[in-house]
Image (cartoon, grey):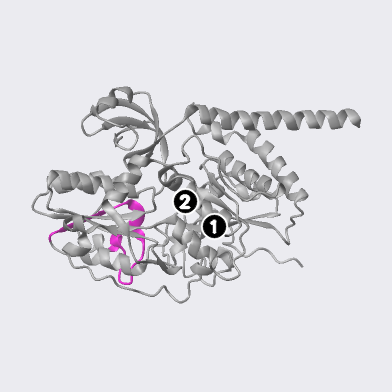
Amino acid sequence: MCLGIPGQVVEVTDAEKRIALVDVGGIKRPINLACVVESPEAMSEAPGMWVLVHVGFAMSRINEEEAHKTLELLQELGELQEEMRNAAAQVA
Amino acid sequence: MQYVNEFRDPEKAQVLIREIQGLTEELGATSESPIRIMEVCGGHTHTIFKFGLEQLLPDSIELIHGPGCPVCVLPMGRVDDCVALAEREEVILTTFGDAMRVPGSRKSLLQAKADGADVRMVYSPADALKLAQQNPEREVVFFGLGFETTMPSTALTVLQAASEGLSNFSLLCNHITIPQTLQALLDTPDLRIDAFIGPGHVSMVIGTEAYGFIAAQYGKPLVVSGFEPLDVLQSVWMILRQMQSGRCEVENQYRRVVPDSGNPAAQNAVAQVFELREFCEWRGLGSIAQSGVQLRKEYAAFDAEHKFRVAPQQVADPKECQCGEVLQGRIKPPQCRVFGTACTPQTPLGALMVSSEGACAAYYNYGIGRHPEPQAA
């Protein structure tokens, strides 16, 4: 029930009420964006935006830069382990 | 970037597992004296079982599955309130699918529906509002439950009903709060938990500062975590790194979704509509001060408790259940005296067997502890 699912805004259906169609895992649903888009005027910028959807409401705009940072950190950690293993193998 | 598969990469998971193994050895943890980490949220419990993370982690890490499943902690008395409302001729009772099967002292909402009550499952509170608009001659009651994650959607729906002047829509409110509940848990005598994996989706609403007291006053590290396997593993790693360097902090692993200050628009909607309840009843944990919210007086017209004069009932948990002990990490689900016998996902007795996010249901569904392990000769 507490599931939050990433979805991408497809098109605005009611700017005044801040409702847009969002593609959530391949299913398009009308989603309320009032908590992530400041005003009806700003709705024009919504298409393409990734949001975290929970029970029909978007509760967070997903930050792509932070997502990359997390993955890069794990990538670097993996490379570091690799180097350590190689270094250990050479010593042996 | 689709924000799902990227965070399920098995190679990166192996990297994290190796780091975790190294750190637990460095910290001197063993299977006899493990580091005990509670994942607060049922969503994390689900991820841990679905991806078999417990089997990947070393024995020197023990995961304790926490109280963070709002369906699991729904008390029987509240289900009885819902059933009583649903049985009224004029009422259409709406709620999320998960709440339908929770046993009350007489019956669940699903059984009430089978017996002829008008109970309807909705995906969103907005769907309940739509039903009220479409059925002006009926009273539509939305049974709203969930943690801070779900509160803003309910609050916005009540605000929408108020702005449209709808007179046939009301809310039976069972929204509950995480920080107060964690505090009550931390005050339990001889609680054996070393650190917490914090709930990511609650935090995207309330932010990370709300947990400061857990690190500062109780000396337990907490890492707010996402829900993919890499998220959970990285959070375990971050907790161990804190322990290794002698730090005790609230950290945020789920930065792509959780800003440290949470979502101000959602917080405003909640503050406008809700106020803290003096006490809130939890299945398995009893009554916890200020652990839930109710509608403010200004919105009494939309409060089903007020509108239908619902007198809150207290019904004791079934005696044979040991949910409270599981929630506090004292026993594992299969050690409960009714696990898998009198209490199964088909006929749940206890809270933790009800929802797929509950610890007992997860153990049962993934076949852990269902059959006695062969005894060594």
Q: Quadrant of residue B309?
A: bottom left
- What's the residue at 51%, 27% (across, down)? A65
Where does the image place residue B10, in percent across and percent down from the top left? 62, 35
Residue toward you, A46 or B262: B262
B199 lies left or right of B369: left
Q: What residue type is labelled 2?
A: Ala
Residue toward you, B279 or B216: B216
Q: Which amino acid does label 1 sit on?
A: His
Residue toward you, B36 or B358: B36
Magenta region, residue range: B90-111
The extreme bottom residue here reads B319
- Residue hosting label 1: B65
Q: Which image quadrant: the C terminus of chain B?
A: bottom right
- Residue hosting label 2: B210
Report whether residue B122 is seen.
no
> Disc 1 on helix, strand or loop?
strand
Q: Label 2 marks which chain's residue?
A: B
Report whether residue A33 is seen.
yes
Label 2 Cα neighbours within 10 Å, binned few <14 / some 14-19 / many ≥20 = some
Label 1 Cα neighbours within 10 Å, binned few <14 / some 14-19 / many ≥20 = many
Q: Residue B222 in magenta?
A: no
- What's the residue at 52%, 67% (across, down)? B339
